Each structure stands twice: as structure tokens, then as C-alpha cells.
Amino acid sequence: MKQNRRIAARRSDASGTKPIYQNHERKLVWLSFIVAAIMLLSIIGRLVSG
């Protein structure tokens, strides 16, 4: 029984309403936007300098 409680606790964040993957999904979306912005700046830099 204790293992089931631990698994249930792991699946939800501190508030207990959202599954953990939604928290990770939000972080991954922000990370992808940051990477896209860096790539855009790199492309703009190449166009300006070249």
C-alpha cells in the first residue's frame, strides 16, 4: 500500500491537480522557444555579417 501512495504522489505535483508530465511539457515548450530564438539570432547574424 505504501508503494501505491508513493507512485500516486509522484504522478502529481505539489498542488496535486496537474500530472507531472504537464509540468515537464511546459518546461519543454519554453526550452524549445529558447532554442528557436537562439537559432533565429544565429541566422540573422549570419545574414548581417555575410
Image (tube, rainbow, N blue to C red):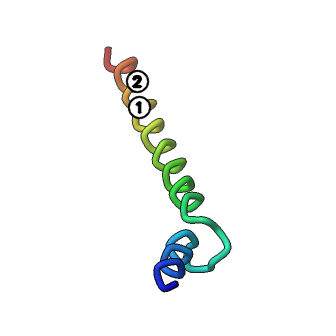
Left or right position of 42 against 10: left
Left or right position of 9 against 47: right
Q: Residue furthest bottom?
A: 2
Q: Residue at x 62, y 79 (%)?
A: 15
Residue under label 1, please give it.
Answer: 39
CB under 8 Å between discs 2 and 1: yes
Q: Residue at x 51, y 43 (%)?
A: 33
Q: Residue furthest right?
A: 17
Q: Residue furthest top?
A: 50
Q: Residue furthest front?
A: 1
Q: Secondary structure at mark 2?
A: helix
Q: Residue at x 46, y 48 (%)?
A: 31
- In the rendered image of this protein, does residue 16 appear above or below residue 20? below
Residues 6 and 2: in front is 2
Could you tell me residue 34's position as x and y percent?
46, 44
Q: Residue at x 58, y 72 (%)?
A: 12
Residues 41 and 25: in front is 25
Identify the image quadrant of the C terminus: top left
Residue under label 2, please give it.
Answer: 43
